[in-house]
Amino acid sequence: MQVRENWLLFALGSALFAALTALFGKLGVVGINSNLATFIRTIVILVVTAGILSLRQEWVRPSGLPWQSWLFLVLSGIATGLSWLCYYRALQLGPVSKVAPIDKLSVAIAIVLALIFLGEKPSLPLLIGGGLIVAGAMVIALF
């Protein structure tokens, strides 16, 4: 499998599992505190990830990681946690069919941030696709 196909396969897997996350999350927050639901989800993610690392024998000593990796992984973890807390509360309050598409505005926001902070180059398909994501989320949210 070529490199292009590898990232695409994992990106499609991510989309599938994100969709299942919305469905199962909506069912899971019924009758419980959304913050507790996020905590339970986080524990499950820790166990699953530790299992994968163990099966693949990919554990390394964290002390060998560069400080920049630590900084950005900690910041990413904080952002992820805040995102999940907001997402589960939104699922508790609103329909999956509206919450999930609004959540996917993160794609358009990530594009803008990548252009600004990572120096990625814009292309016409990228800008059109990002614009369509924003337009689609607005249509779903407003109608």
Image: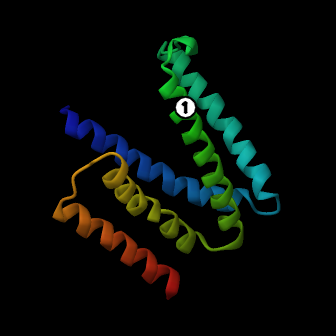
* Frontmost residue, 131 versus 72: 72
Q: Rate crowding at label 1 as few (under 14), some (14 to 19) or many (20 or more) other CA atoms within 10 Å.
A: few
Count the marks: 1
Instruction: Tell me the residue at 44%/75% (across/down).
Output: 137
The location of residue 75, given as percent across then percent down, is 57, 40
User: Residue at horizontal 82%, vertical 58%?
Assistant: 32
In this view, 117 is above or below 23: above
Residue 99 coordinates in the image, percent (x, y): 57, 69
- What is the quadrant of residue 6 in the picture? top left
In this view, the residue in front, 41 or 82, is 82
Instruction: Report whether 5 appears left or right of 62.
Output: left
Residue 51 in the image, given as x and y percentages of width and height: 58, 23
What's the image's color scheme? Answer: rainbow
For the view shown, which residue lies furthest in the bottom direction?
143
Whether 41 is drawn above or below 135: the answer is: above
Q: Residue at x 19, y 63 (%)?
A: 125
Q: In the figure, 92 relative to 46: above or below? A: below
Determine whether, in the image, residue 43 is placed left or right of residue 141: right
Estimate the x, y position of residue 23 in percent, counting from the top left: 58, 60
- Judging by the rendered image, the residue that carries numbered circle 1 is 71
Q: Secondary structure at mark 1?
A: helix
Front residue (pair 100, 125): 125
Q: Quadrant of the N terminus?
A: top left
Drawn side of residue 35 relative to residue 118, left or right: right
Q: Give the residue type at disc 1.
A: Leu
